[in-house]
Image (tube, coloured by chain):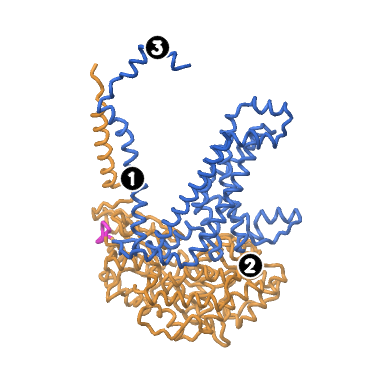
Amino acid sequence: MAAQEIPPVAATATATARRPRRSAQKFPILIVAPALVLMTLLIAYPVAESVHISLGSWDGIGSVTYRGLANYRRLMNDSLVRQSIVTSLVFFVGTVVFTVVIATLLANAINRKVPGARFFKTIWFLPVIVPVSVAGVFWSNSFQPSTGVVNTVLGSLGLGDGHAWLASPTTALIVTIFVAVWTQTGYAMLILLGAMDTISPEVHEAATLDGVSEAGRLFRITLPNIVPMLGTVTTLMSVFAFNAFGIIYAMTRGGPGNATSILPVLVYKQSFVDQDYGYGSATAVVTTLIVGVIGVVVLQLFRQQRLDAR
Amino acid sequence: MRAFNTSKAARRAAVLLAAASILSACGTGPGASSGDGKSLRVQIPAGPMADRMQQVGNDFEKANPGTKVTFESVDSNSSRGPNVALLSSTATPDIGYLQRSTGVWSALLKNKQLTPIDDVWDAAGLADKYAKSQTAYYTTNGHHYGVLYEELLIAPIYYNKAAFAKAGIPDPADHQVASVAEFESMAAKLKAAGYEGFGVGGSSPYDLGHTLDALLPTAVSESDYQAMLTNFKPGSPTNVKYTDPGFVKVLRTIQDWQKKGIFQKGMLGMDTTQAQALFSSGRLAMLQGGNYSYADLKAAKPSFDMGWFLLPPLTKGRKTPFNAFNGDTFVIPAKAANPGLAKKFLKFFMTDKYQVSVVAASGSLPVFTSIQPSRLSNLGDLVQQQFEVSKSVGLVNIWDSTVPSTLGQSFAVPVLQKLVSGKLTPQQAAQQFQTGLENLQSGKVSGATD
């Protein structure tokens, strides 16, 4: 055993090692201190301040007038907030499920060296580097009924060329989910590809010799081996989906009506358009709690999967 | 060799870091004001006027040797909300831009973040040059806190003359269409001739509201319309309601136009720029715009001549007036570094000369009543016509930008979108407006007391 190979003298020396000097003990703390200070300033303080503002009324200037839980009570009875929560959840589920599934399939195909793998890897990653506002304007134009490329393509396939995608509350939400998936899939794919690359090729070769099909290898070898990274990717995509303000605002501004008004869009409108920062902050606090709960649930789900895989 | 003292080094690093943070916070980086009485930062809205304002800056620098004027543009979305943070901070420009109808004005005024500029008004003679309603709109407790520098005419409908000719529709006489039935018949003929009908940027935060604005003064009596412009204030007479037949008729008309296919296909998913592009391409026959749209439409070099008219009245026999937006405002924030120089600049700018050479040349209308249409050949032919017609058919203050945004534009457009998409009946939408009004009157939502 490795422990028995340690020479007795060395073992004794290790056991009786001098305690580090007090300054040396402090050094790690000092090293992380600047980061801690910055995190406190840039994250903890704004979050605490948002909670503070959510407990009052504030028009963006001067001091907050304390109103207790009035904003939260108003929020409970606000049908617009309820609608936004539902919209956010639909958007979240649609975006995360499609992104992770498509990214996994693409990463697997590239990992299995399908013809043109490198080319497709680049193509699928390109949307990630396109600024969100540019992507929003591009797709908004593409989904226009009489001038958009989407209807032109559908028309040439005999699937009708008169769809008013962004004008209908139902299809507008579907389109925004599609664009969010388009922008995020490349990123998820790249992370999952990195995880798949760590699986030894011999394992796949052995499975092939045993007659395991491509699909069988994906479900029995690849997926069990990348469960931790799938958890990370799903958590990241969940957070991205819940905070997808840019795409929505660039494409629909939350409309038509409030059909695509996910919670961050609603927070923007309440705070910056209506100048009701107290109410906007209360909605932001609730949004943060929802994202937090979803994050914890997703991580727990994948933790359980990981334990089961062992 | 001397041992490296980690503890001491870390302490030094921490002190340096803290010092750097404090210095950066106190620094005079880009955007900070110097307060030297010589350099002036002027915020202007992004758009066609930005280039011409540069000339005003050059003229001011020549007239005041040693001064330096810098212009900073603010986009439309920021100017309607987030700009309040900048204008109330110590990094504020010396002159800020805002729209009088937005919460930015209310918040700054309520928190005493605007410098009174009665002396600018006196020196420039603004009370005599503005219309009485404009002066009243810009007077708070007997004082003035901003200058209105341009007027916009809302909702002229631009049309493709070739499309009208092809559909056999004569040019609307006196820029008026007699009735809704006639307008709907025009749209039907245009569709039969292969064009999309009436274009509105339905996903933009204001365009659909302008349709309501254009129809409303023709659907209710003059006194009811005036009441609607002011009855959000606590203590105002409240006998006029948004559930009254006139307002409901406007909502029903808008919904009908969607059902009858009068609007262009996909109107709710198309913003103003996209609707303009559809019109310029020749596919859309009619486009709702403003006097400010004409420059963009001409710049797109359409292959057809354009005309314009006003939407039909909802009450038989009435003429449709023009809606005027009086809200584009320059203010001097209370924390401006050079308020004296800012006042000097505003006095310099608010003259007939710049009303013609800057405001009119940018496609907007001058606000001084003394300036006659004949002096405005640089407006462009159609806008000059609009200006002339506005003198005869009359001007009304635009509803959705006169009432606070919590009832006006930011509230109204999503309600109208739901109405058009069939999620609300006209009565339900009207009730939402009435509830919005009551929320303002009771103080449940802010904006009623500015």
Kind of element beneath mark 1: helix
Q: Position of residue B122 (x, y in %)?
A: 27, 73
Most distant residue in the right direction: A158
Q: Is residue B187 shown in magenta?
A: no
Chain that bears disc 3: A
Query: Disc number at residue A7?
Result: 3
Q: Residues within 10 Å of mark 2 (few under 14, many from 20)?
A: many
Q: As shown in the figure, which amino acid type bears the numbered disc 2?
A: Gln
Q: Give me the residue at 30% from left, 58% from top.
A: B94
- Quadrant location of the N terminus of chain B in the rendered image: top left
Q: As shown in the figure, which amino acid type bears the numbered disc 1?
A: Thr
Q: Is residue B336 shown in magenta?
A: yes
Chain represented in orange: B
Q: Position of residue B289 (x, y in %)?
A: 54, 68
In this view, A99 is above or below B10: below
In this view, B233 is above or below A243: below
Q: Residues within 10 Å of mark 3 (few under 14, many from 20)?
A: few
Q: Identify the residue under disc 2.
A: B264
Of residues A28 and B200, which is closer to you in this image? A28
Q: CA distance from mark 1 to mark 3?
A: 47 Å
Chain that bears disc 2: B
Which of disc 3 and disc 1 is earlier in sequence?
3
The reply, left or right, for residue B260 in relation to residue A77 is right
Q: Colour of chain A?
A: blue
Residue at mark 3 shares a chain with residue at mark 2: no
